[in-house]
Amino acid sequence: MAAVPALKRTIRFRDLFLFYVVSGLSVRWTAMAAAAGPSILLVWIAALFCFFVPLAASVMELSSRFPEEGGLYIWTREAFGDASGFISAWTYLMSNLPYFPGVLYFGAASTLFAFGGGARSLATDPLYFISFSVAWLGIITFINIRGLNLGKWLNNLCAIGAVLPLIALVSLAVIAYFRFGSANQFSMASLTPHFTLGNAVFWSSVFFAFGGVEAGSAMGDEIENPRRIIPWAILLGGGVLALGYIGGTTALLIALPSSAVAGPDGFINGVALLSSRLHVEWLIAPVALLVGLNSVGGAAAYLSSTSRLPFVAGIDHYLPPAFGKVHTRYRTPYVAIGLYGLAGVIVALASQAGTTVRGAYDVLVSMAIIAYFIPYLMLFGAMIRLQSRPAGPEVRRVPGGKPVAIMLAIIGIISTSATIVLSVIPSADEPNKPLAVLKVVGGSGILIGAGVLIFLIGRMRMRRALQDIAVKG
């Protein structure tokens, strides 16, 4: 790998901790989970120990072994070679593109609650949702091109949009419990998950609500002393995630019937119902705005971190060298950030701009389903593979050393593999199930194949460049 151009180390412990909060804690998951009933609480606990703990442990050690810019790309490249490193980065950045309109649409829907019943008429207006998404993606991209010293403050501010609404929700739920009792019954029967194929598919998606802790390491050369602060930021951020998801879901289950929080606006609708019931309607508007801010923060965190992957791939010449450029004034990978932001805007437009384009967007989502999980498989695989390499005294190892590290990585691989299998299963209301499976599997194959093709083209371009240098020499 060529030397990474000088980047500015502006991310401190506070910034990284809040980054993990805003990238990992999305309040929409609490409502989606609560709609499934009290048994989802045990699924949250299983997700914490079977996915988040292995992921956090792997990221802590891998980021300590290789703290450079690129994170996941570097780890899998060191473990399995250049091709694996590129494909893991490619699938990760491509699978995140449909995430941007998804999370921003949630924020757009929630924000409407801040402006009364008249504004709610926009809930079915595609122009409103696309304008909200495109405008925020443009702002996020511009701010991050200007530098992480500015972009980190957007992440920090938006982290408040995750924490304060959950604190408000828990507070309202406690008051509602003492006034009215629990809206759902908590018993051994209600807390026991009942296995059906449909439930298992939903449970697997809940596991990946804990994903995202790997994203911060992509900015390794922009973090002050990454070996020291990444583990502590992960531990503290992970604690907030666990409390937020489990505590927020419990609060909704105590305060409201499961049916009251179903749908994309379930969280803010639940807060609105609770506020009206407790005669504190003034709370609805600020919470709605904060939830909107939380969605903006999710998009900002992933755009700022994931855009570093094509940057490092550009330095390695597997993408055009322009991707590896650093702005002389702002000291940011401005080309990689700008193009990734533009790609996010295109996907957001595709989600609403007519039936044909909407069909293209649906294909992109199908392509991204399996591709989203592949980087996690490779990350856990890299954790196992790299245990054979000696680690210097500066490397922070998983407590218990090699046996514990391998055991945790295997648990992560099992959880991820099960999710991949379940993600292929079509929903019960899907009219053409074989076609649905074909779209997911075939689309994912096309996406991975495109990555392989781009990698091979980059490798041929690099070989020609080396041959030219040898001839001239």
Image (spheres, helix red, strand yellow):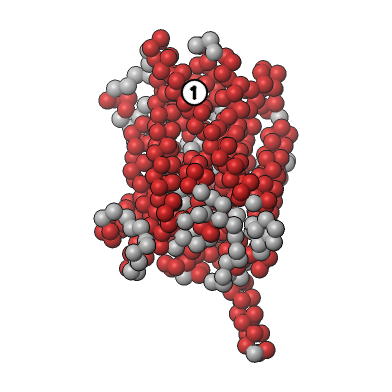
Q: Position of residue 106 (x, y in %)?
A: 59, 33
Examine the rendered structure and indicate whether residue 65 appears above or below residue 24: below
Residue type beneath disc 1 = Ala
Residue 105 as seen in the image, left or right of residue 418: right
The residue labelled by disc 1 is 168
Examine the rendered structure and indicate whether residue 15 appears above or below residue 257: below
Q: Position of residue 184 (x, y in %)?
A: 38, 19
Q: Identify which residue, 93 or 453, lies in the foreground.
A: 93
Quadrant location of residue 281?
Answer: top right
Quadrant for the C terminus, please. bottom right
In this rendering, the count of numbered labels is 1
Quadrant location of residue 263?
Answer: top right
Q: Which residue is at 36% across, 41% downward?
A: 48
Q: Position of residue 69 (x, y in %)?
A: 53, 60
Secondary structure of the residue carrying tag 1 is helix
Q: Say whether residue 281 is visible.
A: yes
Quadrant for the N terminus, please. bottom right
Q: Position of residue 401 (x, y in %)?
A: 28, 59
Q: Say whether residue 218 is visible.
A: no
Residue 195 as seen in the image, left or right of residue 468: left
Quadrant location of residue 378?
Answer: bottom left
Q: Which residue is at 57% across, 66% downward?
A: 4
Badge 1 local density, few (<14 within 10 Å), some, or many (20+)?
some
Examine the rendered structure and indicate whether residue 122 appears above or below residue 436: above
Q: Which residue is at 66% across, 44% downward?
A: 140
Q: Which residue is at 46% across, 31% downward?
A: 30
Residue 288 as seen in the image, left or right of residue 170: right
Q: Identify which residue, 268 or 215, lies in the foreground.
A: 215
